[in-house]
Image: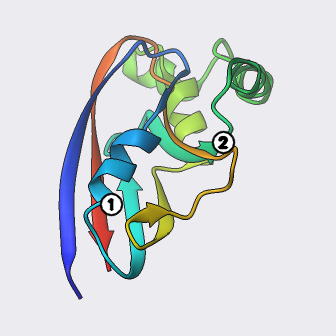
Amino acid sequence: MPTTSAQLQIHTDGNGDVVDLTPRVAEIVAGTSGAGVAAVFVPGATAAITTMEHEPGNVFDLRQLLDRLVPREQGWEHNRLNHDTNAHAHIRAAIVGPSETIPFEAGRLMLGAWQQIVLVDFDDRPRERTVLVNVIG
């Protein structure tokens, strides 16, 4: 089974920045024939990969929900023990998860009409992120 690997370098603003990865992942998959899956993974404990409709209202709503579920200022033990400020980012990333697996067929991702692959950076500062894409098929 043939495989292809790629690394995407993404600059984020942190603080819940949501970056659409779909065109770049689609470009990697475009050269494939047949069917398979694209695994998209972000290393690190304060970022996540998911799928969603990437439009301003939905991005705003996701940020608002996560602010209510996992508030930044909560007296988190991680922050106390490590003299840190990003415990909320670690927890949010754990909830959303570091990866998604998307099927493809004939070089096209099998996403829904309003579904995009996104990187969400929960850390409390801008970051340079590496996203790993493994295409199996």
Q: To which residue does mark 1 refer? A: 29
Of residues 20 and 109, the one nearer the viewer is: 109
Can residue 90 be seen here? The reply is yes
Residue 64 as seen in the image, left or right of residue 33: right
Residue topped by disc 2 = 52
Q: Quadrant of the C terminus?
A: bottom left
Q: Secondary structure at mark 1?
A: helix
Q: Is residue 70 above or below residue 100?
A: above
Seen at 28% across and 70% down, the residue is 32
Give the residue drawn at x 60%, y 47%.
51
Give the image location of residue 103, x and y in percent: 50, 70
Identity of the residue drawn at 42% across and 12% down: 13
Q: Amino acid at mark 1?
A: Val
Per the model, the C-alpha gap separating discs 2 and 1 is 19 Å
The N terminus lies in quadrant: bottom left
Q: Where is residue 58? Give x, y as percent.
A: 74, 27
> In the rendering, at what x and y percent does residue 109 appear?
48, 61
Question: In this view of the protein, can residue 42 be seen by the observer?
Answer: no
